[in-house]
Amino acid sequence: MRLIQQTVRAEFHYPVHFTRDAFRPDNQILRNVLGSGNEGQRRILFVVDKGVCTSERQLLTQIDTYCHAHAEVIQSVAASIVIPGGEVVKNSSEYVDIVRDAVNVHHICRHSFVIAIGGGAVLDMVGYAAATSHRGVRLIRMPTTVLAQNDSGVGVKNGVNLYGKKNFLGTFAPPFAVINDLEFLESLSDRDWRSGLAEAVKVGLIKDAAFFEYLEATTPSLAHRGAAAMEHAVYRCAELHLEHIRGADPFESGSSRPLDFGHWAAHRLEQLTLYRLRHGEAVAIGIALDATYSHLVGMLSEPEWSRIINILLRLGFSLYVPELECRGVGKDCALLDGLSEFREHLGGQLTIMLLEGIGRGVEVHNMHPGVIARSAAILHHLARERSISHAV
Ligand SMILES: NC(=O)c1ccc[n+]([C@@H]2O[C@H](COP(=O)([O-])OP(=O)(O)OC[C@H]3O[C@@H](n4cnc5c(N)ncnc54)[C@H](O)[C@@H]3O)[C@@H](O)[C@H]2O)c1
Ligand SMILES: [Zn+2]
């Protein structure tokens, strides 16, 4: 019997830029990310979220002008591919096929680039198509929503949905670079402006009390589209997210997924509401549910629980949808299936992040269905009491 024990090490480096007007011809960031002029032109395929084009009417022209101005490094291989925005692009194979076909037809190789411009859903789908073509072509992400700039677009994951399950197909694939153009946020709907703030509240709650306090102090500004407050919120949230990925288990080989605080319920609620809820809106409810649970089991004090519920409400989130209802606990509770799906997606032992204080996440390996149901009932009661509409 013989054995060769192999070890493979790989290190990834990628910049995450924060800028405005990335396609103004004198903005050098994208050009510099692509490399020096000595290396000649790079073949580039742009894939753009239609929602961004609709609101930024000049975007496609600006891209063309930018490519022209930097023709020594950029060879745009075709007109930008414009695809719908939102979860629809992750719910069928149609759009992955469109991107893969374009990679094939336009001879995008592993030294060429796909540049994805859009919300988290478009970035996830294009990222998956890029990572699985030629075993991975270079991807530059240009996130255009708050959620994509502060969370989904800066990390190492991509994916599409299958079998009614979020991100059933996907890979871990660090991008070549990320360019966060804060100007894109101006055209977001109020819903999408708010939605990404749930991830900022989340990361503050599990990792950084001072950041949570910043979000509390700037809530009026954040809720009324204050650009300066949002700029810092996006930057710090992205920074905390990146620090976490850098330090721990970037490809999630363990059973723990701390950044997914509030997400076991959120992913399930997204499915149960047939994606009526945005990801961030579902995360806000998931945070409220797990914070309430943490309080009910004696881990989190009442004043801290109130602060969490209050910031979410003051930011404008609804914290209850009928799909939270746990009728027949332990038997037919559709929400509770989220726990087993969450465990199965990661593998290993069920590991859920709860709170023992603001800025202090703690992992548990068991959740009591009865307490989850009571937590949901409290959110229902709160919603009724405050006459907060759950219709979104
Ligand atoms: N890969 C990860 O690590 C990760 C992490 C968190 C979330 N996600 C995924 O991200 C997705 C949610 O992303 P999202 O919240 O960005 O929403 P989204 O991508 O669904 O976009 C929401 C809407 O905003 C529009 N839009 C995008 N940018 C715009 C702009 N600048 N102006 C006007 N409209 C614009 C889109 O067309 C869409 O209609 C979910 O699929 C979620 O699962 C992935
Ligand atoms: Zn999330």
Image (cartoon, rainbow, N blue to C red):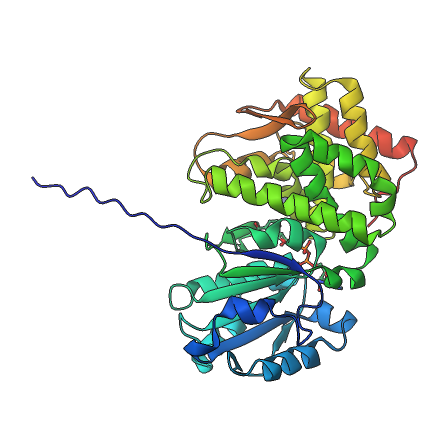
- The answer to whether residue 334 is visible is no
Q: Residue at x 76, y 32 (%)?
A: 213
Q: Residue at x 45, y 82 (%)?
A: 105
**Who is closer to the viewer here, 385 or 182?**
182
Measuring from the top left, give residue 294's x and y in whole percent: 68, 22
Measuring from the top left, give residue 103's x and y in whole percent: 47, 75
Left or right: residue 231 versus residue 1 is: right
Q: Quadrant of the N terminus?
A: top left
Measuring from the top left, give residue 296's x and y in whole percent: 71, 19
Above or below 331: residue 109: below
- The answer to whether residue 279 is visible is yes
Quadrant for ligand 2 reads: top right
Measuring from the top left, give residue 135's x and y in whole percent: 38, 64
**Who is closer to the viewer here, 201 or 268?**
201
Left or right: residue 55 versus residue 352 is: right
Q: Residue at x 54, y 38 (%)?
A: 342
